[in-house]
Image (tube, grey):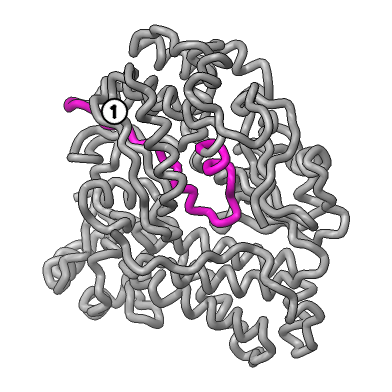
Amino acid sequence: MTPTRATWPRRLFDGVAGEGLADLDAHQAQWGAIPPLSPEQIIEVAERSGLLGRGGAGFPTGRKMRTVAAGSRRAVVVANGAEGEPASAKDKLLLTRVPHLVFDGIGLAARAVKADEAHLVVHDNHRLATTLRRQLAARRGDPVVVQVHELPRRYVASEETAIVHWLNGGEAKPTFTPPRPFEQGVGRRPTLINNVETLAHLATVARRGDEWFRAVGDLDEPGTLLVTLSGEGADRRVAEVPTGTTIGAVAERARVDLARSPGVLVGGYFGTWLPTDYATQLPLTHRALRSAGAALGAGIIAALPPDRCGVVETARVASYLAAHNAGQCGPCLNGLPAIAGALRALATGRWDDRQWPLLERWLSVVPGRGACRHPDGAVRFVATALSTFAADVARHRSGQLCRHAGAPAWLPVPSVAAGWR
Amino acid sequence: MRITVNPIDCKAHGVCAEMLPEWIELDEWGYPILDGEELPAQLVAHARRAAKACPTLAVVLRGE
């Protein structure tokens, strides 16, 4: 299925008609020119707006720019549009429909941190990269030329230290040793890495101001947010919603029926499964989701349809995550395949219940021991699935036949790329 | 002082656990499990020797 867009009051997609791309003329007709703000003014308006990063960590955008701007060497800007989460479609939709909002954001960020080099990283997708390069070619007045790069299709490759390592000529694998990218990143220079949605918001904030931005959404985490919603009959539907909207309200407005769903995945494969009744009450803020033991991540909401089995889906994604480890750190390299193997046995009726304590031990011993957070995320995905789908788990453990074993795969698991360059 | 391991450099030689069995447990694949707690004073000298002995120099002492 092709990702589709839900109707919702919108900012980022404001004025974009139909399903087309807003080219430079259409973009400028909608938004006008980039205002002539000084570097300090850009950082200040970003700080006052309360804009938090939309890539997952939710770090304050203004503060991040101020830190990079204070570096001793000339800075570099990296826009992360790689969207490593298979269940996410928002960054690609943003780049496909309103690329110039992202380019404006890159330009503003570069001005703010006084960068003379900017990179836009997308996942290996030649059509998208070609479109972006063509759109960039029309922007002759930009002081900093944006270079578009196609990153290998690997789950961990879009992690920020992996992107920096790759842009520096290495493999797209996370690194462990400090310094962090904001100190020494691309070319050993202070590097500002932002998700493309964050940069698009920055482009709107610079024009309309921080009060306009804060007028919508949660008080402490204001603005709108792109979410990707999947559920019964809905495959990766992107919606722009005010922060603080509950998951139930988002689903209702996007016309996705959650009533029969046994569990909702929040945040992506790095995220958390929650029982549906509980998840629908939760507002989309970092604060609320954190206190629920979950994380907003990149805004993924996936409600398992009633005709799918939580154990089977989890086993498939666990195998995908195991295959996508970078092969660098022992606990992840060994632990994730062990966990995935146990889940496959559980899912396919080859289970011996004496394996259960072993599975529990692996889930407790693997997290927190990698260079990146890949093992932590994979374990959280599996552990919360086992508790959310406890009834399915009990059935599988007792050796009963699974009613949905033959159902086609629901959560997307792309094939693994050949290399890391 | 705390003992940490660079997880990319660690290749499960197990020398650290051999030299510091009171403090370092290995997982089923031979990689050290560290809880990140402050090392007792009487183990500091052993920890330094373990760090030096690691074939891949993956053991890192912090807070020295």
In what quadrant of the picture does the C terminus of chain A appear?
A: bottom left
Residue A368 can be seen in this image: yes
Q: Is residue A136 magenta?
A: no
- Report in which chain the residue with disc 1 lies: A
Total marks shown come to 1
A328 vs A350: above or below: above
Q: Residues within 10 Å of mark 1 (few under 14, many from 20)?
A: some
A126 vs A396: above or below: above
Amino acid, disc 1: Val
Judge from the rendering whether residue A145 lies leftward or rightward of residue A293; answer left or right: left
A211 vs A365: above or below: above
Q: Nearer the viewer, residue A251 or A415?
A: A415
Judge from the rendering whether residue A167 lies leftward or rightward of residue B52; answer left or right: right
A335 vs A228: above or below: below
Determine the image quadrant of residue A261. bottom right
Residue at point 33%, 72% (across, down): B32
Judge from the rendering whether residue A399 lies leftward or rightward of residue A113; answer left or right: right
Residue A337: x %, y % from top left: 47, 77
Residue A252: x %, y % from top left: 83, 41
Residue at point 30%, 64% (across, down): B7
Determine the image quadrant of residue A271. bottom right
Residue at the spot of label 1? A145
Q: Nearer the viewer, residue A152 or A261?
A: A152
Q: Nearer the viewer, residue A338 or A416?
A: A416
Residue at point 68%, 75% (across, down): A312
Q: Secondary structure at mark 1?
A: loop
What range is drawn magenta here?
A72-95
Residue A285: x %, y % from top left: 64, 36
Residue A101: x %, y % from top left: 49, 25
Residue A60 can be seen in this image: no
In what quadrant of the picture does the N terminus of chain A appear?
A: bottom right
